[in-house]
Amino acid sequence: MTGLAGRRVIVTGARGTFGRQLCATLHAAGARVVGLDRCPGTTAGVVVLGCDLTDAPAVPVAVRAAVDRLGGLDLLINNAGVGGPAPAELPPDDAVRQQLEVNLLAAWRTTAAALPDLIAARGRVIFVASRMAVLPLPLAAAYGVSKRALVGYADALRHEVGTHVGVSVIYPSMVASPIHDSTAAAGLSLSGVSRPEPVRGVVAAVLRAATARRAPRDVATTRRGRLELALARHAPGVADRLVRRAVAARIAAGDLDAAPLAAGMVHRHRDR
């Protein structure tokens, strides 16, 4: 797959921040695109079929409808995702379960439904993960765990179907989008810990993976991202120290004083 014109593509989370831009860019490049999203309609001239990806029986039906509309499938982009605060020291709640459902299981069941068509076309599947899959941050355990599990699923899938289907994972950092709203509302903004990057960089990384002669395994979205991925993989202890230093600086500055979910961590840092 070295071009996009005429390629048959499904994009999940098509009405979200990344999804809208992906649909617009793919459509402009001549790809035939169908979106899947909880909110049906159109975006950038692309038809979006309504589907709750956490509804296991509904997913194969929606995927089949999309494939039938496209006449086959060359590329699946698993982009749908949700975030939110979730301290690891607290028991898992509904927000944790939702993040595991959407970020991991939804991608798993969508991929499983699409695989027969992807195998027939010798196609590709791309997972939009997160830098937090390899460089986790405190107070967002569910997001980091779900994205790390997504990478684990991609790795297992690659071993099983990699002879016929290319499998790539994209690792964005923080991008301004509604996915961070609940975290910011809880007083747990990532400002000062994660450096923002533009949506266009994430879209460009997805397209590089989609059009490369051979499907790349892992794709960072920025030069800094490549360094962070390398550091997390080859010097995890150093990466941990850098995160702890950044978090300690935020606590010392009082940035987390008004966040109830951070109270335990703040107390422990000041009680040392």
Image: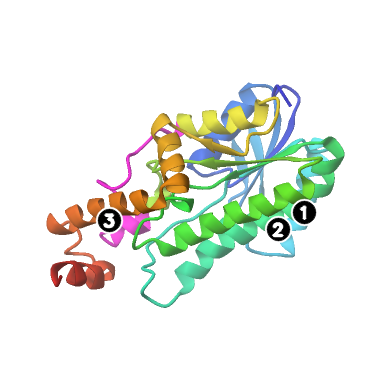
Q: Is residue 184 magenta?
A: yes
> Could you say whether the residue bearing mark 2 is in a helix, strand or loop?
helix
Most prominent secondary structure in the magenta stretch?
loop
> Could you say whether the residue bearing mark 1 is in a helix, strand or loop?
helix
Examine the image and state in which quarter residue 45 appears: top right
Q: Earlier in the sequence, mark 3 or mark 1?
A: 1
> Do labels 2 and 1 touch, CB within 8 Å?
yes
233 lies left or right of 262: right
Q: Can residue 184 be seen?
A: yes
Q: Which mark is residue 113?
A: 1
Examine the image and state in which quarter residue 28 appears: top right
Residues in magenta?
Answer: 181-199
**Residue linked to disc 3:** 244
Q: Which mark is residue 242?
A: none
How many marks overall? 3
How far from the left and from the top, in percent, is residue 198? 40, 32
**Residue linked to disc 2:** 109
Residue drawn at (75%, 54%), measured in percent from left and top? 112
> Could you say whether the residue bearing mark 3 is in a helix, strand or loop?
helix
Q: Can residue 52 be seen?
A: no
Circle 1: residue type: Ala
Residue sitting at the far right? 120
